[in-house]
Each structure stands twice: as C-alpha cells, then as structure tokens.
Image (cartoon, rainbow, N blue to C red):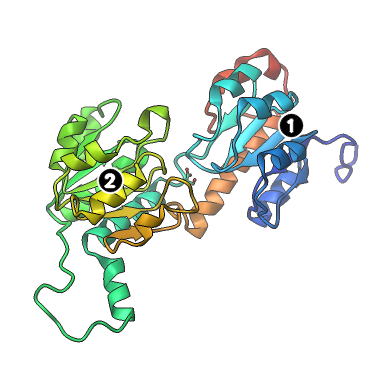
Amino acid sequence: MRQTELPLHRPHVLIARAVFPEAIARLSEHFEVEPNPDDAEWSAVELSRRLGGKIGLLATSGERIDAALLAAHPHLRAVCLMTVGYNNVDVPACTARGVLATNAPGVLTETTADLGFALMMATARRMAEAERFLRSGQWTKWRYDLLTGSDVHGATLGILGMGRIGQAIARRGALGFGMKVIYHNRSRLGAADEAPIGARYVDKATLLRESDHLVLVLPYSASSHHAIAAAELAMMKPTATLTNVARGGIVDDAALAVALRERRIAAAGLDVFENEPTPNPALLELPNVVLLPHIGSATEATRRAMVGCAVDNLVAALTGGTPPTPINPEVLRGPRWANRA
Ligand code: DGY
C-alpha cells in the first residue's frame, strides 16, 4: 500500500465535545473521526446514537459513561477522557466489558494548584467583593476597616485530599507563604513527602477545627458525597474560609449557603458546584463567596496538554501501543485486547 493510501476500513471514533483542531487532525491520521465542532451538548440518547459503529470515544468529565451505554455499544473498546476527574465513568462496568478507560492526570496538577491557591487568597482577602465595591462606585475613601479579610501568610492551611493537586497547593502555602499545613487523606503521605512542607496528618475533625483556610481537593465518589455538609461546617472556625476546586457534590451547597449567610464561616471560594452550570441560587446572593465557572485547569497550555493526553491514550489503545494513563490497565491483559495491532 502506498503511504498516501488509507486503509479501506479505518476504525471510527467519536469526540464528544469541541477540542483543539490539532487533536482532530492527529486522530484523523489513524481513524475516521466524528467531531463535535459546535460543542453541542448531546443528551444521553444522542451520545448513544452517535456512538453507534465507533470503537473509541474521546470525552470529558461531563458525559455519563454508564453500564447502559456500554451495553448498547459492545464494540466500544476505549473511552479516553481529557480530564483528570472520572466520576462520570462507571469504571467497574468498563472493566467487566474489557473497555479501556483513561484520564489525564499529571498534566493539570500545577495549573489547578495555581487556581486553587489564587481562589483561596481571593476568598481570604475578599477580592471579588472588593472589585464589585469599586466598580459600583461605592469607594469614596480609605477606611481602617474597609473590606478587611484574613491573612494567608502564616495561617493554617488545611487540605482535604492530599493527592497530586493537594500536595502542589500545600507546597505553595508552606514554601511560598509560610503556612502551617495540616491534611487529611485516605492514606497518609510518606515522610519524604511530608517533611519538605512540614505537613501534619490529622483526622478529619481536627482538620475542620484547626484550619484557617480549608481547601478541598479530593476526588468525588459516593463516599465523598457531601463530605462537607452542615455538621462539618459547624466544626469550622467562624473566621475560616473554605475553597472547593475538586468537584461539586463534595460540598452540600445549600448547607454552605446557610453557613455563609449566618457567618458560621467567614467566606468560601467555589470553582465547582452541585448541578453545574447552575449554582444554587442562594450562593449567588451572598457577598462572601467567590464563584468561578469550573476553570481550575483552564490555561491554554494545560488544556492543550489535557486534550493531547486523551489523544495519546486513544491512539495508543487502538493502534497496539501502550496507553500512557489508563484507569483500568488490567483490561489490556484481558482476552479482548490480546494480539491487538
Ligand atoms: C478535571 O480535569 O477533572 C477538571 O475538573 C475538569 O473537569
């Protein structure tokens, strides 16, 4: 076959959301690609319809990949996410069917940590509220107590979920701002990771009680649903701030709105919400919450790296290579993937 000739039956893959053109170009070198250039929001039924005849799917954390979808598409072999979070994917169902699932860890760690730290600072120093104050013409003079917030330097930074991003935020706090770092996590870090940032492992109750600025960076799952609800908020200092850059659903947003309104905690910074993209209306009315539209990893370079990671995984999976970041690598040793090329 001459180099310029394409095989007659190239595998078909679906891209669920708009992506950088170079990603479509790279996939098109290997596959027949159905993209979604308008970034249309497909219903579950529409996603399933479009998945017909495809063996690969490039998706985000927004598309629900559940047992029913997998059962309807027995030829599907790989689902590759451009996000690190994969709580939208039923991984056991994928594994049971021999479907490889991949995500994009690592490439967004530092960018998301930047945003998490910035949001924590904006929350502590009331930056969004201050900007609204200025823009609305209310600033008439300097005053000793104008928009006073709380210090970040030297304060106690609490991290719930000490994975890659949690550790990157902790480094910023400890090494850049002289913060004391306490954390709670499913498993304790090794001494080699704790020591450089002086991180102290504590139970969840201590974390809630002692943090001046609590940052949530844990993955969402049934067990982390409403990990921060009314009871947990009641344990926090009335001067504390809460920042969530993890997932909506980890915080009970209705309970948080009550706690903020009643000043049981000082302020919150939220990049993620229950029911995105429609935050709880009670939050929108409060001055002491900084609200961002899920932009934790949103820099041009990082978004390109995330999409690139998903493309690398999909190409490798379907052309006999080694996918770099599998979630369920065990499927590659199963019968469905034997002799792949
Ligand atoms: C991620 O990568 O999980 C981001 O939160 C985008 O969903």
Few, some or many residues within 10 Å of mark 2 (<14, 14–19, 20+) = many
Which residue bears the numbered disc 2?
A: 215
Q: Which residue is found at the position 76% from the left and 40% from the top?
A: 50
Q: Please give the name of the residue rendered at 54% of the width and 41% of the height, measured from the top-left corner.
A: 61
Q: As displayed, is residue 154 above or below residue 27? A: below
Q: Which of the image's four quarters has the C terminus? A: top right
Q: Please identify the quadrant where the N terminus is shown.
A: top right
Q: Residue 284 at x, y = what percent?
A: 37, 60
The residue nearer to you, when weighing 133 against 90, is 133
| Residue situated in front as seen by the camera: 14 or 317 | 14
Q: Say which residue label 1 marks.
A: 55
Frontmost of labels 2 and 1 is: 2
- Asked if residue 244 lies left or right of residue 181, the reply is right
Residue type at tag 2:
Val
Residue drawn at (26%, 60%) of the image: 288
Location of residue 212 with respect to 160 vertically, above or below: below
Residue 255, quarter of the rendered image:
top left
Q: Is residue 198 visible?
A: no
Asked which secondary structure carries label 2, the reply is: strand
* Relative side of 316 to 248, left or right: right
At 67% from the left and 46% from the top, the residue drawn is 42
Q: Position of residue 215 (x, y in %)?
A: 28, 45
C-alpha gap between disc 2 and disc 1:
39 Å
Residue 137 image position (x, y, % from top left): 30, 84
Residue 109, percent from left and from top: 40, 45
Tell me which label, 2 or 1, sits earlier in the chain.
1
**Is 281 left, or right, of 89 in this rendering?**
left
Q: Secondary structure at mark 1?
A: loop
Find the residue positioned furthest to the top.
335
| Res. 127 visible in picture | yes
The amino acid at mark 1 is Ile
